[in-house]
Image (spheres, rainbow, N blue to C red):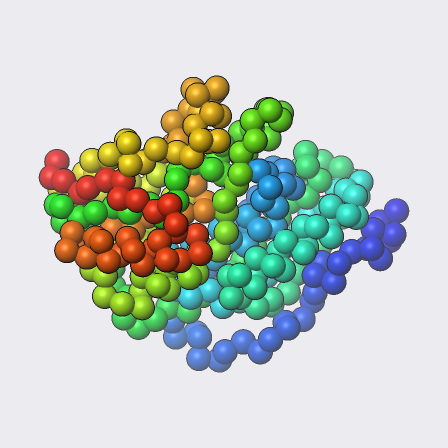
Amino acid sequence: MTSEIKTALPPLFSLRCPRVSVDPDMHRSIATATVVFPRNPLVTGGCSLGTLAVSVAANRLLATGATPRYISATFTIDIDTPSAALRALAEAMERAAVDAETEWLGCSTEFVDRGCSPYGVEVSVFAIGQMPPDVDYYRDSLRPGDAVILSAPAGAHGAALFAARKGLKELQVTDDTAPLNDLVHALLREDYGIRLIAYPEGGVNEELEAMTADTPWRVEIDRDAAAPSADVAAVCARAGLDPLTLPTTGAMLTVVSPEFEEAALAAIRRSAHGARAAVIARVVAR
């Protein structure tokens, strides 16, 4: 049975050698990111687990200012997982890697006789990025009056994941997870007075609290500006959830000085995934 599955696997799953030559100068300025998804559905809110894994790894790098360059993956696969599902997963990862502007270094695959995941596949991704020499934003640079921009409404991934796990098929939630290269590159291409870029994969509230921890500042949220999309709001109303606490993997938080607020917001809205960006909070003194 395992040999039949291996024969039917897409090429990505058996990629052992790099498709590219690694830039030998990268060792001077690398950043890395590792993500593991042991218990995620293969598709959540229309978003493949493959898209999710590649996007989160790339977006973690982007939030540091690094440009994603190379990627590798490890798969643990239940032998009963349909080959069509594996092909869809591989194809989604290939597309996401292109969107993230990364190139494949290799993949490893292990087959198990049930038990790896309730959904049949565990995925881990390791990504390497290159840091530019002039990125110097950090949370200590926050100042009162700074604007906090969220590039897309909060909670889409978390709400979609909740609905999928609870079997709430009547609640259709679109998971907007995607690599956000164009958005971050647009912000770094010009001087927009950026204080900090953060990736709220654990929730917007969690990231806002982290960025002001051990500082003299706090963040004052405008709940109207931070309102979720209608489908996420429906899930939250049904389950008593706060969208700002839900995993948000298709958006970036950007803190900018107030004089650059409108220009930065316009730049984000021009990007592929920033049309619904809004200023959701202000930095204020404690």
- Residue in the picture at 52% in, 41% down: 175
Provide residue 15's location: percent of width, then percent of height. Answer: 70, 65
Examine the rendering and report whether any part of residue 140 can be seen. Answer: no
Q: In which quarter of the image is residue 43?
A: top right
120, above or below 231, in the image? below
Image quadrant where one finds the C terminus: top left
Examine the rendering and report whether any part of residue 19 can be seen. Answer: yes
Left or right? Give the position of 28 relative to 148: right
Provide residue 230's location: percent of width, then percent of height. Answer: 44, 31
30, above or below 277, in the image? below
Provide residue 141's location: percent of width, then percent of height. Answer: 17, 54
Left or right? Give the position of 13 relative to 172: right
133, above or below 61, in the image? below
Nearest to the observer: residue 134 or residue 251: 251
- Residue in the picture at 37% in, 45% down: 276
Left or right? Give the position of 78 relative to 54: right
